[in-house]
Image (cartoon, rainbow, N blue to C red):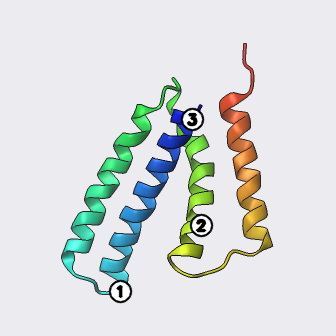
Amino acid sequence: MLLAVFFFILAGLAEIAGGYMVWLWLRESRPLWYGVIGSLILIVYGIIPTLQSFPSFGRVYAAYGGVFIVLAVLWGWLVDKKAPDLYDWLGAAICIVGVSVMLWAPRS
C-alpha cells in the first residue's frame, strides 16, 4: 500500500511540476528550456503509473486523479501562494475517500 501511495505522489508531482514549467514558458514568457524540461518531466510522469501493481489501467488512472487533486491544491498553496479555502479542503478529502474505496475496497 505504501508503494502504491508513493507512486501516486511521485506521478502527481511529476505531472504538476512538468505542467507548471510548460505554463511558465508559454504563459509567463520564460525561456524555451522551461518548456523542454517540463515536457521531459511530463514524459516521465506518463511512465510512473505503469509501475503500479494494480492490474487495471482505468482504475489506476481514476484513483490517481483523486491524488492529483490533493497535490494540485497543495501546489497552489505552497508554490503559487493561493491559500485553499474550506471547500478546496473538503473536495480534496472527498477525493481521497473515493480513491481509497476504488483501490482498497474488498472485491470478489
Q: Position of residue 97 (x, y in %)?
A: 75, 45
Q: Position of residue 89 (x, y in %)?
A: 74, 65
Name which of mark 2 and mark 1 comes first in the sequence.
Answer: 1
Q: Position of residue 38 (x, y in %)?
A: 30, 64
Q: CA distance from mark 3 to mark 1?
A: 37 Å
Count up the numbered dots.
Answer: 3
The outermost residue toward the bottom is 29
Question: Tag 1: residue type?
Answer: Glu
Q: Position of residue 72 (x, y in %)?
A: 56, 64
Q: Which mark is residue 65?
A: none
Front position among marks 2 and 1: 2
Q: Which mark is residue 28?
A: 1
State the residue at coordinates (45%, 57%): 13
Q: CA distance from mark 2 to mark 1?
A: 21 Å
Secondary structure beneath dot 3 equals: helix
Question: Tag 2: residue type?
Answer: Leu
- Left or right position of 98 against 54: right
- Considering the image in quadrants, where does the N terminus appear? top right
Question: Tag 3: residue type?
Answer: Leu
